[in-house]
Image: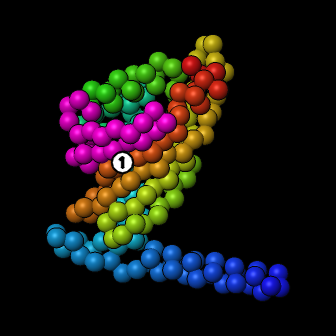
Amino acid sequence: MHASGRDSRRQEGRSRRRRRLHRLATAPGRQNGAGTLIGAPVIETEVRTLFERYERLFRQALAGEADMDEVASLYASDFIAASPAGVMSGKNDQQLRNVMAQGYAYYRDIGTRRMRIRDIRVAPIDGLHCMASVAWTATYARDDLAETAIDFEVHYLVQVRDGEARVFGWVSGDEQALLKRHGVV
């Protein structure tokens, strides 16, 4: 087979995939049980709003000023989490609030100064669900540590119900190994 023919077919395949993804991302929404129009463009807006709140609440938590009920409102009633340590599931209850408060205290103890979103990529799954890949930059500083910025990414599973986006799962890398590699812990 001639190389240019193969390249041409590959390009056509890529173009078809791009058109299909564009159709999915711009497909008209449908109504949920509450009569709210839900669709890919709505998901994109709701997800960005969710993570703007997430970033703002993280900043408040680093300042020791977070309302754990508001932080918990970012999450669905049940959730799953996966990392190199394994997979777990949990409930959005008082135990989650306690664990999150301890986690924020840990971040303050190791010198976390800022947590900033660099980018959000939203991949719709259907009219109500998507995967949001969030690129973060965490900045650390202590007396024994010069200001250190670490980039990382977390992939969140998000559901939009009644016009509100909530996280119901996430997949993250090995946070402790990354912190060790940069001398933070």
Image position, residue 15 (x, y; %): 62, 81
Query: What residue is shown with label 1?
Result: 169
- Residue shown at 23% from the left, 29% from the top: 95
- Bounds of the magenta segment: 72-96
Residue 184 sits above or below residue 130 on the image:
above
Q: Quadrant of the C terminus?
A: top right
Q: Determine the main secondary structure of the stretch shown in magenta.
A: strand
- The reply to whether residue 34 is in sight is yes
**Left or right of 76 in this view: 39:** right
- Residue shown at 28% from the left, 58% from the top: 164
Q: Amino acid at mark 1?
A: Gly
Residue 142 sits above or below residue 169 on the image:
above
Image position, residue 3 (x, y; %): 82, 81
Q: Is residue 136 a member of the stretch shown in magenta?
A: no
Q: Is residue 87 a member of the stretch shown in magenta?
A: yes
Q: Quadrant of the N terminus?
A: bottom right
From the viewer's side, name the closer residue of 47 and 96: 96
Of helix, strand and loop, which one carries label 1?
Answer: strand
Image position, residue 105 (x, y; %): 39, 22
